[in-house]
Image (spheres, coloured by chain):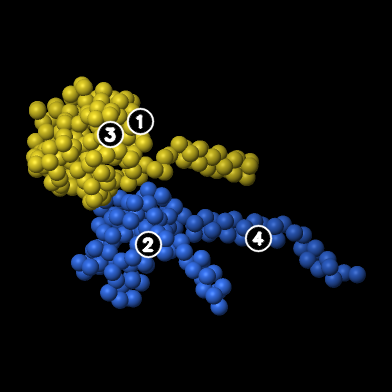
Amino acid sequence: MWRFVLPLVLALGLGVLLYAGLHNDPKNIPSPLIDKPAPVFDLPELNQPDARVSTGALAGEPYLLNVWASWCVTCRQEHPILEAFARQGSVRLVGLNWKDQPDDARRWLSQFGNPYTEIAVDEAGRTGVDFGVYGTPETFLVDAKGVIRFKHVGALTPEVIAREIEPRLAAMRAAGGS
Amino acid sequence: MRVVALLAMALFAHVALAIEPLPFKDEAEQVRFQRLVAELRCTVCQNQNLADSNAPLAKDLRLRVFEKMQQGRTDAEIKQFLVERYGDFVLYRPPVKPQTWLLWFGPAVVVLVGAGLVFASVRRRARALPVDAKGIEDSP
């Protein structure tokens, strides 16, 4: 009896495992930076050449760091969702313009609209590498203490915002009282 | 002779294409660099290593590796730099730790279990054979 049941159970188990694996996105590499302090940066602002965007200045309240570039096709797809989310004004939305030409970036924003509170220019891509960026768009949720709490690779969707970002933000507000 | 040279060039063209010229101070340094980037995974094009990939990010990361070598960092420190940012995933040889035991030892366990099953089955069949069947081929 067992000689027939056991292989069947093993085969079914393997089948379930492999089937679940089909729905795993290999592009989604778990970030080692979750629950670690966000890498320190101090970069020029895209629209105000004299201003800087830095981790020091951003500390004190949670913010969403969205890594984007004008050459990134998925960023265009994500853009209306970011715009809608920015209109709610529930969190500071910081852009990190990664490995891009500032002129191209400004043109892109004037064409589609600018959802960001401020935009850091990372033309050489070094800050992006510090954040472990490998595919734009990527979005990091950083709390008031400057600790990365969540990372999303790929375009944000209303579902991701509702399921992953908003509950975390609410918890931060409740804990931090800001 | 010229044909051989051309063939050799064609054969190694992919290496030359991806890697930009870097100011190595000697051959040993270059060999060390090549070995290091061959063991690091490009996270954009996941089935390529940093040595083969011509993705812009891979190029940046190669430069960072070279930079760290110039600063006198060890191979372990350079790998650690990338692991802190991209996770163990960047290493083609992931470290042995509880989460990777299955990865490292799983195949050996499967082979041992399989060998055990075969051994048990062979023994059972040998015992199941009638005693006088043993000499069956010799009998006229």
Which circle, 3 or 1, is nearer the viewer?
3
Which circle, 2 or 3, is nearer the viewer?
3
Q: Mark 2 points at which residue?
A: B19
Circle 1 sits in a helix, a strand or a loop, which is it? Answer: helix
Can I make out residue B17 in this image? yes
- Which amino acid type corresponds to the residue marked 3 in the rendered image? Trp
Whether residue B109 sits left or right of residue B80 in the image: it is right
Of A24 and A120, the residue lying toward us: A120
Q: Are marks 1 and 4 on the same chain?
A: no
Answer few, some or many: residues within 10 Å of disc 1's Cα (few below 14, many 20 plus, some between 14 and 19). Answer: some
Cβ–Cβ below 8 Å for labels 1 and 4?
no
Task: Tell me the number on the disc at residue B83.
Answer: none
Q: Do labels 1 and 2 share a chain?
A: no
Q: Do labels 3 and 4 share a chain?
A: no
Q: Are marks 2 and 3 on the same chain?
A: no
Measuring from the top left, give residue B122's x and y in whole percent. 66, 59
Q: Mark 4 points at which residue?
A: B123
Q: Which of marks 3 and 1 is nearer the N terminus?
A: 1
Tell me, by letter, which chain the rendering colours blue: B
- Which amino acid type corresponds to the residue marked 2 in the rendered image? Ile
Quadrant of res A78: top left
Q: Name the residue under label 1.
A: A77
Quarter that holds the C terminus of chain B: bottom right
- Which amino acid type corresponds to the residue marked 1 in the rendered image? Gln
Cβ–Cβ below 8 Å for labels 2 and 4?
no
Q: Name the residue under label 3.
A: A108
Answer few, some or many: residues within 10 Å of disc 4's Cα (few below 14, many 20 plus, some between 14 and 19). Answer: few
Q: Mark 2 lies on which chain?
A: B
Of A32 and A14, the residue lying toward us: A32
